[in-house]
Amino acid sequence: MDEMPKEIRTERLLLRPFRTSDVDDVNEYAQDPEWGRFLPVPKPYLRSDAEEFVSRQLAKKWSEEPDWAMVFDGKVIGGVSLHDRDHERRTIELGYAVARAHWSRGFATEAVEAVVAAAFTNLSLKSISAMADVRNSASWRVMEKAGMTRKRVVQEDAPSGGSPVDMVVYAMSREEWETMQA
């Protein structure tokens, strides 16, 4: 199979490809500086940045970098993506972000669990990883709730070009995921 579904439904969310009509929703949540505090996004975030983001999503090749809009009650509240796939090592990296108005409500965990399940079901992967700024403990809680385990801390270049940032790396193997499903 080796192709991710374009739509994934969870208890509360619809995960689907971004659409041109999503610019207003993305612009609304991304203008919040707290939302982008640990993300490599422009600061301040402008409407033109939202337009460019959505355009990039539309231009991506789905089979290489699926990126779902996270829709709750008809409104885009964030996104979840798979990127940096290494076919030889059979690994992929997961990323996610949720509008601050929806933090601490389990939406990120719900979306991450659904995408991890779809990835292990549809792709020949050995593992899925994710990383977050070490100061972003809410993000590591999402990874932990989704069944990932902390592997290491690495230093990465800061998104804004400042000092390097410590990033915590979490991962889950196919075997760990299958054990969780049993």
Image (spheres, rainbow, N blue to C red):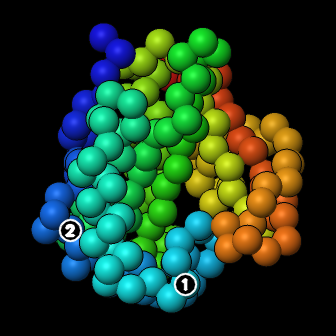
**Which residue appears at 47% of the width and 79% of the height?**
100
What is the number of callouts on the image? 2
Residue type at tag 2: Asp
Q: Residues within 10 Å of mark 2 (few under 14, many from 20)?
A: some
* Circle number at residue 79: none
Q: Earlier in the sequence, mark 1 or mark 2?
A: 2
Q: Residue at x 50, y 39 (%)?
A: 83
Residue 31 in the image: above or below residue 38: below
What element does badge 1 sit on? loop
Residue indicated by mark 2: 22
Which residue has dot 1 on it? Answer: 43
Q: Is residue 15 visible?
A: no
Badge 2 marks a residue whose secondary structure is helix
Alpha-carbon span between mark 1 and mark 2: 20 Å
- In the image shown, does 81 or 179 lie closer to the viewer? 81
Please give left or right for residue 5 compared with residue 143 in the image: left
The mark closer to the camera, 1 or 2, is: 1
Q: Is residue 78 above or below residue 57?
A: below
Residue 54, given in percent of the width and then of the height, sits at: 28, 62
Q: Is residue 56 left or right of residue 95?
A: left
Amino acid, disc 1: Lys
Rendered residue at 74%/66% (across/down): 158
Q: Is residue 18 left or right of residue 79?
A: left
- Which quadrant holds the N terminus? top left
* Residue 159 x, y percent position in the rendering: 67, 67
Is residue 104 in view?
yes
The residue under the point 43% across, 46% down is 81
Answer with the quarter of the image where residue 177 lies.
top right
Report if the CB atoms under discs 1 and 2 are less than 8 Å apart.
Answer: no
- Residue 79 at x, y = what percent? 38, 58
| Residue 13 picture quarter | bottom left
Find residue 116 and report its horizontal and vertical position in percent.
47, 34
